[in-house]
Image (cartoon, rainbow, N blue to C red):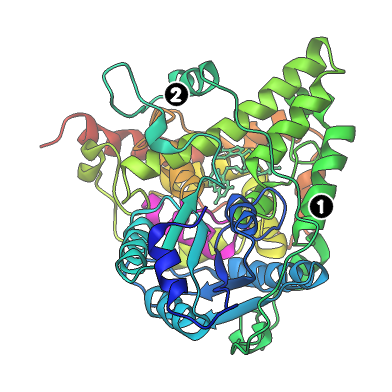
Amino acid sequence: MTSPSSAQTDGDRSPGHIGPAIVWFRDDLRVADHPALHAALEHERPIVAIYILDEESPGVRPLGGAARWWLHQSLRSLTASLEALGGRLILRRGAAGPIIADLVRETDAAAVFWNRRYGLAERTLDTAIKHDLRAGGVDAHSYAGSLLFEPWTIQTGQGGSYSVFTPFWRACTAGPPPRAPFPAPSAIPGWTGEIASDEVDGWGLEPSAPDWAAGLRATWEPGEASAQAVLATFLAESLPHYARDRDEPAQNATSHLSPHLRWGEISPHQVWAATQTAQRDLTGPALTSATRFLTEIGWREFAYHVLFHAPDLATKNLRPAFDAFPWPPLDHEALAAWQQGRTGFGLIDAGMRELWRTGSMHNRVRMVTASFLIKNMLVDWREGERWFWDTLVDADAASNPFGWQWVAGSGADAAPYFRIFNPDLQAAKFDPRQQYIRDNVTEYGTNAYPAPLVDLGETRRAALAAYERVKNPA
Ligand code: FAD
C-alpha cells in the first residue's frame, strides 16, 4: 500500500516514473525470511538494496577484527544472492543518516524498508532517520527480523522487564508462537539507474600484513546458503543428542549457528520452524534435546531483552553493588598470557587458542575462561568482554556483554559470584580424555608448556575476600 505522502511525491515526477524502494540491510544479511525485503517487494517497485558501513554515527560500537572478516565474506555472499535474483547491493561507508538521505535523492526513492535493531545508539539513529524520511514525504517502514520476541512485547505482570530467564522464557512461550518464515523471493526487480557503490575489497575489512585469518577461513563459510546447510546438518546429526553432549567441547554437538545468527544470515524464525519440524519425529531424550536447543535460542532473546532495558550492558554493571568491587591495577603481562593461551591451565589455554585460531570458542569454555580471568586473575570483566568482542566471529552486542556479566555475577540471572569454576575440575569433567586440550595446545604435557600462572586456591580465596566489598560496601 502506498501512503498518501509518497503518492504525492510520485505525482511530482515524470509520467511512468516509479520511485524505487530502498531496502537497507544491516544485521540481516540474507534474502529469505527478510521481512523488510518481503514487504518492499509487495510494493511492486524496483529495489535498491544498500549496506552501509557506519563507523561514524555516535555510539555505534566499532566492529572487532574477526567480525570485520566475517562481514567481508557475508557481503560478498549477499551481493551474489541479490545479483542471482536480478538485484544489486550498493555499498557505502559513513554516517547512515546522510547516506540514506543521499540515496533517496539520487534515486527518487518513494520508501525505505529495514529490519529493526535493538541497541540504543542504533535505535536512536533509526528513529531519527525514520523521522527525517517521513518529514521529507518518503515512507519508512521497519520490521521484526532478528528476534522472535521483540524486547518490549514481553512484560512482567506489573508491566516491567524481566531479569530472570525462566519466567521470561515462560512468558515468551505462553503467547502466540513465532510467525512462520517468509519464503525467499523468486526475483528482485533491480533499479536500473546509475548509482555509485563502493567495492567491498576497498573497505579493508580483511586483515593483511599480517593475515591472521587463515584459521577463520579454514573453519567457517559465511553466507546464507552455508547457514542453511549448517542448520540442516545440525538437525539431522546432532539435535537428538544435544542435551547430553552440548557441554563437551571435544564433541561436535552444538549447532555452530551463532555467527550466522549474529549476522542475520539465518533468522531465529527459520531456526525455530526447522527445529519444530525436526522434533515432530523425536521422542524421549531426543525430544528433550530439541526443547533444550530452543531454550538456548531463548537465551539469545533474553540477552536482547536485557540489552534493550540496560543499553550500557557492555560497560556498566547491571547490579550497581558491583561498582564497589576492588579491582587491582591491571597486570598487562598476565592479561596477555590469558589472551594468548599461556596460563599453564590446559582448558583455559585450549579455549583461548581456539578463539584466536577460529574466531570462536565452545560455550562451556567461554564460561570457564571468563571465570578464570575475572576471579582467578582479578581482571575486570570489561577487559575480557573487549577481547572477545575483537576476536569472536559471533561477537554480539547483547550476548557477549550478557555472558560476561553472567559469569562476573554482576548481570541478569547471573551465576553467583562465589561460584568460581576450577579449570582443572572442569577439564576433568567435560574433557575427560583431554582431547580438546590436546587438539588446541600441541605442547600440553611437555616441558615447553608454561607453568601455572596462578595458584587456584590462593586466588580463589583472594576473590572471595574482594567480593566481601560488594556484599558489604564501605
Ligand atoms: P548452540 O548451543 O547450538 O546454541 C544455539 C544458539 O543459541 C546459538 O547459536 C546462540 O545464538 C544461542 N545461544 C546459546 N547459548 C547462548 C547464551 N548463553 N547466550 C546467548 N545466546 C545463546 N554468543 C554469541 O552469539 N555471541 C557472543 O558474543 C557471545 N559471547 C559470549 C561470552 C561469554 C563470556 C559467554 C559465557 C557466552 C557467550 N555467548 C555468545 C553465548 C554462547 O557461548 C554462544 O552463543 C555459543 O557458544 C555458540 O555456539 P553454538 O552456535 O554452537 O550454540
Q: In the drawing, does residue 147 fall left or right of residue 275?
A: left
Q: Is residue 353 left or right of residue 322?
A: right
Which of label 1 and label 2 is nearer to you? 2
Image quarter of residue 347? top right
Q: Is mark 1 within 8 Å of ligand 1?
A: no
Residue in front for this viewpoint, 235 or 405: 235
Magenta segment boundaries in residue numbering? 379-397
C-alpha span from label 1 to label 2: 38 Å
Ligand 1 picture quarter = top right
User: Residue 20: percent from the left, percent from the top?
Assistant: 57, 72
Q: Quadrant of residue 394?
A: bottom right
Circle count: 2
Q: Does the rendering let one see residue 247?
A: no
Q: Dot 1 surroundings within 10 Å: few (below 14), some, or many (20 or more)?
A: few
Residue 70 % position (x, y): 67, 67
Quarter of the figure with the C terminus: top left
The picture places residue 217, in percent across and down from the top left corner, at 79, 68
Q: Secondary structure at mark 2?
A: helix
**Residue situated in front as seen by the camera: 472 or 58:** 58
Residue of label 1? 439
382 in magenta: yes
* Apparent side of residue 315 relative to residue 360 in the rendered image (left or right): left
Tags 1 and 2 touching, CB below 8 Å: no
184 to 339, vertically: above or below: above
Res. 110 visible in picture = yes
Disc 1 marks which amino acid? Answer: Asp
Label 2 amino acid?
Phe
Residue linked to disc 2: 168
Decide: few, some or many residues near mark 2? Use Cα within 10 Å; few <14, some 14-19, many ≥20: many
